[in-house]
Image (tube, rainbow, N blue to C red):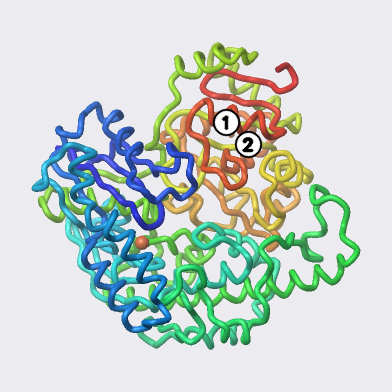
Amino acid sequence: MNILGISCYYHDAAASLIRDGQLIAASEEERFSRIKHDYGFPKQAIEFCLEQGGIRGEDLDYVVFFEKPFRKLDRILASVLQTYPQSYKVFRESMITWVLDKLWVGSTIEAEIGVKRDKILYSDHHLSHAASAFFCSPFEESAIITVDGVGEWTTATIGVGRGNEIRLLKKIDFPHSIGLLYSAFTAFLGFEVNEGEYKVMGMAPYGVPRYVDKVWKVVRQNQDGSFALDMDYFSFQHSTDQTYSRKFVELFGDPRPYNLNFFTEGTGFPKYFGDPPSNYNELCKLNQHYADIASSIQKVTEELLLGIVRSAQQLTGLKKLCIAGGVGLNSVANTRIFKETPFHEVYIQPAAGDGGGSLGAALWAYHSILGKPRNFVMKNAYWGRECREAEISDFLTSHNIRHTILRNEDELLDRVVERIVGAKVIGWAQGRFEWGPRALGSRSIIADPRNPEMKDIVNSKIKFREPYRPFAPSVLAEAAGTYFDLEDPPAQYPPRFMLYVVPVRPQHHATLPAITHADGTGRLQTVFEDQSPLYYRLIKRFGQATGVPVILNTSFNLRGEPIVTTPANAFHTFSTSEMDTLVIGNFMVDKSTM
Ligand SMILES: [Fe+2]
C-alpha cells in the first residue's frame, strides 16, 4: 500500500512516500526548486518520491494533506475579525492566498498527481506533527508534545501515543504561541522570521540572561504548563509584516538593525569582516545588549517548554517522550528536557517542523485510520535523492571539469583524510540527501575540528556566516562519550539528528576548538556504521590518522541558499566559494588543479 503525504502553503513544503508503513522517500521542495523554505505545492518533491518508489500518481492508494484547510480558514477569519480594521491588510492577503491555493488543495492534488478525490484525506496539523515523531520512534507508548508557531488554531499540544493510536489531551490556541514569541524576538534581533531562529539560539551563549524578567512581562505561564502572551506587546495577530508592537519596543529598546555585523568582546572582530570600525567598542557594547536579549528569550523559551513537558509527564505518567513542531528543533531546550525532567528517553525526527508534517500525515492515515500495525523506526535521515554515478560523470565531463576517479573506498577515504589533516575544506556529497534542515554527512562541508583557525577559515572561505554560528561535530557514536558530557550517547536518538547541544568535556575544549561553542558546548551528531557506513568509516579513518574520531560538519550550501541536491548545485557552491576539494560519489575535484 502506497501513501503519499503532503505539506505546503505555510512554511516548508514537503512530500513523503510510505509503502506498507515503511518510509521510501521524503524531501522538502526547496531542495529541488532551490527556493529557501519554498512553501508552494511540492510538485518536484512529489515527483521525486514517486520516482524513488518506482510508481506513478495513479498507483497511490491515498494522498494525505497535513492539515484541514477549512479549520485554518476559520482561525484566520476569527482572529482577523477580532482585530478589524487594524487587520484589514492581513485579511485581504489571506483571502487572496486562501482562495487561490489552500481551499483548492484537493483540486490541485487531483490535477497534479492524477488521484481521485475519494483517495485524498486530511489530517490535523498538530496530529500530523505528533504522528511524525511518535510513529517514527521506537516507543510502543509515549507522551508527545508538539510546539510550533501556529497550525490551524493550535500552537502547542500534549498527547499520548499507544501502539497505532495517538490522542491529543490538551492544547493551547492561537495567538498564544511559543513559536511566534520566539519569532517576534528573531525579528527584533534583526533576523528573518522562520529562518533566523537558529541565529538567536547561536547568539544566546554570548549573552547573559539579564532581561528574563522583562520577557516574563510579555508571556506568562501557569502551574499546569499552559501559557499566554500579553497581546499588547505583539502585532502578528493583525499584521503581515510586523510581529511585535510599539509597546514591545518601549520595553526592550530599539530593534537591532538587520545589517549590523555581530561581534562582542567574546567573539572578537573576525578577520573576514575586514578592519574593525572606529566605533568598535561602542558596537561591541550594543551587540552585547542584543546578545543578552537573545540569551533571555532562549532561557524563557526553555522554561516554557520545561513547563509543558512536566505537565505532559503528570498527565500521562509515562517515561518516554516524543517532540515535534518547529520548536522541537531548539536543540538547547531539547537537552534541558532530557536532563531536567523525568523523561530519559526522547525521540525527535529530523524534520520536526512543518515539512515533517507530510510524513506524519501519511503515517497517521496508515496506522490510525487504516489500523495497520507499526513496523518502522527512523534511525537515519537519508531519505532524499542520490546523485547517480552516470549523472556525476556526465556533468563533470560535459563541463570539462578536471577530476579524479577514486577507484575504491580505501582510496577515497585516504585522499579525503589527507586533505582534511592538511587544513583543506571539503565539499562532501554522498548517497541520498538528508530529510530536515541539518546536514548529517550526505551533503556536508567537512574540515578538521582540531584546528583553532578552522572556524574562521570555513566562515570566511565558504559560508560568510557570522561568528556566533557554531559548527557542529560529527563523532563516532561509541566515542561520543569521551568528548561530550552525555549519558550513554549511542542509546539516544536526538543526537543522531544533531538535536541536542551538550557540554564538550573540559579536557577536550583544546582538542576540538573549531566545534566548541562560546559556552563550552557542541551540537553533536553521533554517527553509526549501520546507518551511515561511508561517513562512519571516514571519521574512523580520520581518527586513526589523528587520534580524534571527530569531524567538523556544516551544511553544504552558501549563505541563504538551500543545501545542495545535484552535482550541478554542488559544483556551483564549490566554485563560487573558496572550498578546496569537492568529492561527489567517487569523483574528486581539487581546486588547485582545475
Ligand atoms: Fe506546524
Placement of 273 over or under 197, stated as above or below: above
User: Is residue 450 or residue 269 the one in the foreground?
Assistant: 269
Q: Residue at x 48, y 71 (%)?
A: 340
Q: Secondary structure at mark 2?
A: strand
Q: Residue at x 86, y 69 (%)?
A: 281
**Picture quadrant of residue 172:** bottom left
Q: Label 1 amino acid?
A: Trp
Placement of 26 over or under 213, stated as above or below: above
Outermost residue on the right side: it is 278
At which x and y percent is residue 226?
Answer: 37, 82
At which x and y percent is residue 282?
Answer: 84, 72
- Determine whether, in the image, residue 360 is placed left or right of residue 482: left
For label 2, the residue is 446
Q: Label 2 amino acid?
A: Ile
User: Is residue 360 or residue 560 the one in the foreground?
Assistant: 560
From where the camera sits, is residue 477 visible? no
**Picture quadrant of residue 142:** bottom left
Q: Residue at x 38, y 73 (%)?
A: 309
For label 1, the residue is 428
